[in-house]
Image: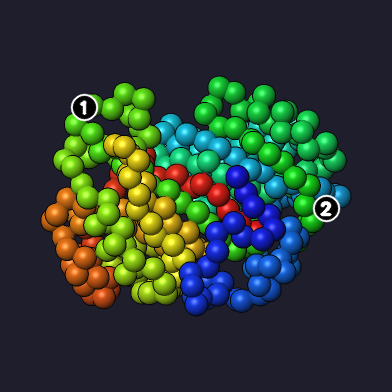
Amino acid sequence: MATFQKAAAPPPPGGGRSIAAGEREGATPESRDFTPPRTAAPSDPPPEGEGERATYRYALTIEYDGSPFVGWQRQANGASVQQRLEEAVAALEHGERRVVHGAGRTDAGVHALGQVGHVDLTREWREDRLRDALNAHLRPDPIAVLEIRRVAETFEARFSAIRRHYRYVIDNRRAPLTLQRGRAWHVKRRIDAQAMHEAAQALVGRHDFTTFRSTECQANSPVRTLERLDVRRMGDIIEIVTCARSFLHNQVRSLAGSLEQVGSGKWSADDLRAALEAKDRTRCGQVAPPHGLYLVAVDY
């Protein structure tokens, strides 16, 4: 679920709020409310005619199974989460397309428990009725609007965010997956979660993550600040939990795949640290599959 006031996860000891390279530092999280000042222009232009009438902005907390979609963003090669949401909105807007702006552009197959989007509507709605109306038009797709809040026009799902939380799930059992199929990375060989966690701490903080980003990443800078990177085991399930203000394309999956190399004994903690310091994409371990990744929450 989205957190719209004070961030849920504290910054690392001795550190403050993380500011990704190229992003302007504004007020501290403690002083930010649900209607922070605009920090950048929206990435998608509004549809023709939008803005000429009075509009009402709503923030949506969204859950979805990413398996049948090409990702969050509209694409020509298949259905996306954004497209289906916009189609549901259009049904309430007399067929007009209204852009649903997302906090994060998840890739094909990636899931969300707390994606956040915002949309401008020409009619003022009671929040619970709008939620139910959208969900009715989203059936039978595996997308659910969990919560809706009316917000000020300065709120932007992407640029107002101060922290994003991701979880990567590994099912570490010998037997084939049934209920977890398409929901976790199945790794049969026994892996050491404690060794993964200890090695991961070298990646916490502000670093150049060139090694752990896609060659197609469009970010201006590879520098990011990881506030948290924890690995924990619960029975056969291993979770990699991380948060930062922003992430590079494929960063979490790249980190998860390299940490699995440590857990399986193929890499040492020193190997992981050397890969980071090399700032070379070819030094990255395998990229973990998308179906184990979840966008858990976004803080504002």
Quarter of the image with the C terminus in it: bottom right
Q: Residue 204's spot in the image, x, y percent?
A: 39, 68
Amino acid at circle 1: Ala
Which of the 4 image quadrants contains residue 16? bottom right
Amino acid at circle 2: Glu
* Left-right relation of 173 to 27: left
Q: Residue furthest left?
A: 266
The one nearer the camera, 54 or 21, is 21
Q: Residue 264's spot in the image, x, y percent?
A: 17, 50
Rendered residue at 78%/43% (across/down) = 121
Q: Which mark is residue 52?
A: 2
Rendered residue at 34%/66% (across/down) = 201
* Left-right relation of 268 to 98: left
Q: Label 2: how many residues lie within 10 Å, few (<14), some (14-19) or many (20+)?
A: few
Which sits earlier in the primary sequence, circle 1 or circle 2?
2
Q: Label 1: how many residues lie within 10 Å, few (<14), some (14-19) or many (20+)?
A: few
Q: Residue 63's spot in the image, x, y percent?
A: 56, 37
Q: Which residue is mark 1?
A: 175
Rendered residue at 72%/69% (across/down) = 31
Rendered residue at 86%/50% (across/down) = 54
Q: Secondary structure at mark 2?
A: loop
| Relative to 218, residue 169 above or below | above
What coloring was used for the rendering? rainbow
Which of the 4 image quadrants contains residue 26? bottom right
Quarter of the image with the N terminus in it: top right
Q: Residue 39's spot in the image, x, y percent?
A: 66, 69
* Left-right relation of 224 to 197: right
Which of the 4 image quadrants contains residue 174? top left
